Amino acid sequence: MVFQEAFEWYIAVYLFLAGVGAGAIVAAVMADMYDRKKYISFIKAASVIGMPLVSIGIFFLYIDLGQGLWKPWLLILLFLNPTSAITWGTGILTVFTLLALIYGAFNLGFIKFSGGRTVQWLLIITGILTAGYTAVLLGVLKAIPFWHQTSLPILFIISATSTGISGAMIVREMFFKTEDSMHKIETSHFYLIMLEILLLVGMFLIAMQGVPEMKFSALSLLTGKFALEFWVFLVFLGLIIPAIVFALGEAGKMHISGSKLVFFEALVLLGGYFLRFLIIHAGVYTQKFIEYIPQ
C-alpha cells in the first residue's frame, strides 16, 4: 500500500481554516435570525474570524497551486471550466468570502447595510457549501478510495460548524464577553459534537467493509501508523473530553467560563484540525493507480 504524498500539511490547514471560518459565519447567521439582540456578542466574535480565516485558508491553498502563487493572473483560469469541481469551489469561496466581508463589516459597525435576509440565506448556503466542498475536493480524486465516502462532506460540515462555534466562543470570551446566556448555542454545540462522533464511527464501519485500500487507510488510523494522533488528539482530546465537559455543563454539574471555556473550546479546534490532517495523510492509492506513480 502506498500513502499519498501530494497533499501536505498546508492542505490540512486550508481545510481546517476554511471550515472554522465558514462554520462561524453559518452559526452567527442562524443566531442572528433567532435573536440578534441576545446573541450579538457571539455574532460579532464570529464576524471577526469568519472571512479572515477563510481568506488565510485560501492562501494555503494557493501554495499548493504552485504557479498560481507567483503568477496570480493565472488564477482566472480557475473560473473557466464549468465541469470542474475546482471551478465550482472557486466560485463558492469567492461568493462566500465577499458576502462574509459585508456581513462582518455590518456587525462590527463599519457599514450600515448588511444585505438583509437575502445575504443571510446566501451566507448559510455558501457557508455550508464551503465546508462541504473541502471534502468534495478530496472525493474527486478517484485514486484514493478512503476519500470516497458519502459521509465525508457531512462530517466536514458538522465539524466546521462545531469548530466555528468554538472559534467564535473563544473570541467572544476574550473580547466581546457579556452577561447574556449562550445556553442554546452551547446546547447546539454539544449535539454537534455527538453527531460528529456518530458520523466518524459510521465512516469507519463503512471503510472496514470497503476495498482493501480503504480498509488499510482506516486501520492506519485505528491501529497503525497514525493511531497515536487519531486516538489522542482527535478522539480523546478533540471529541470525548469536550463532549463530557459540555454534557456536565448542560446538566448543571459544571460551570464553564473564562479560561476553562477557552481551553475546552481550543480542544475542539485541535480535534477539528487533526480530523482533516489525519484523513488526508491516511489516504492510500488504489493498486490500479500505483503503476502510474513515478518511482
Image (tube, rainbow, N blue to C red):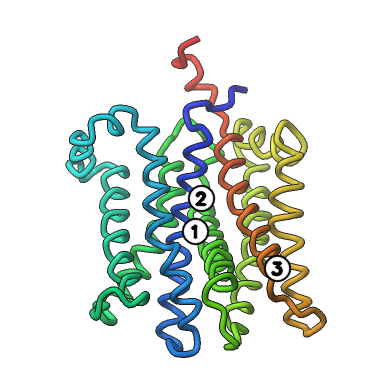
Q: Nearer the viewer, residue 136 or 65?
A: 65
Query: What amino acid type is highlighted by mark number 1?
Result: Val
* Mark 2 burial class by Cα count in 10 Å: few <14, some 14-19, many 20+: many
Judging depth in this view, the residue of 185 and 262 nearest the camera is 262
Q: Is residue 258 left or right of residue 248?
A: left
Residue position marked by numbered label 1 in the rendering? 20
Q: Amino acid at mark 3?
A: Ser
**Residue furthest out toward the right:** 253
Rendered location of residue 1, percent (x, y): 62, 23
Foreground: 53 or 95?
A: 53
Q: Are marks 2 and 1 in contact (CB under 8 Å)?
A: yes
Q: CA distance from mark 3 to mark 2?
A: 23 Å
Q: Which class describes the residues within 10 Å of circle 1: few (<14), some (14-19), or many (20+)?
A: many
Please report whichever mark, 3 or 2, sits nearer to the chain's N-terminal start.
2
- Report the residue at 60% width, 69% height from top: 192
Determine whether the residue tagged by mark 2 lies in a helix, strand or loop: helix
In the structure shown, which secondary structural element does the residue marked by tag 1 occupy?
helix
Give the residue displayed 48% in from the left and 32% down from the top.
Answer: 7
Above or below for 148 versus 213: below
- Measuring from the top left, give residue 206's x and y in whole percent: 63, 48
- Per the model, the C-alpha gap separating discs 2 and 1 is 6 Å
Inter-mark Cα distance, 3 to 1: 20 Å
User: In the rendered structure, which disc, 3 or 1, sits on the residue that comes first in sequence?
Assistant: 1
On screen, residue 146 above or below 165: above
Judged from the image, the secondary structure of the residue bearing numbered disc 3 is: helix
Q: Nearer the viewer, mark 3 or mark 1?
A: 3
- List the residue tagged with mark 2: 16
Q: Residue at x 70, y 39 (%)?
A: 221
The residue under label 2 is which amino acid type? Phe
**Which residue position holds label 3?**
259
Kindly indicate whether the residue at mark 1 contacts the one at mark 3 (C-beta within 8 angstroms).
no
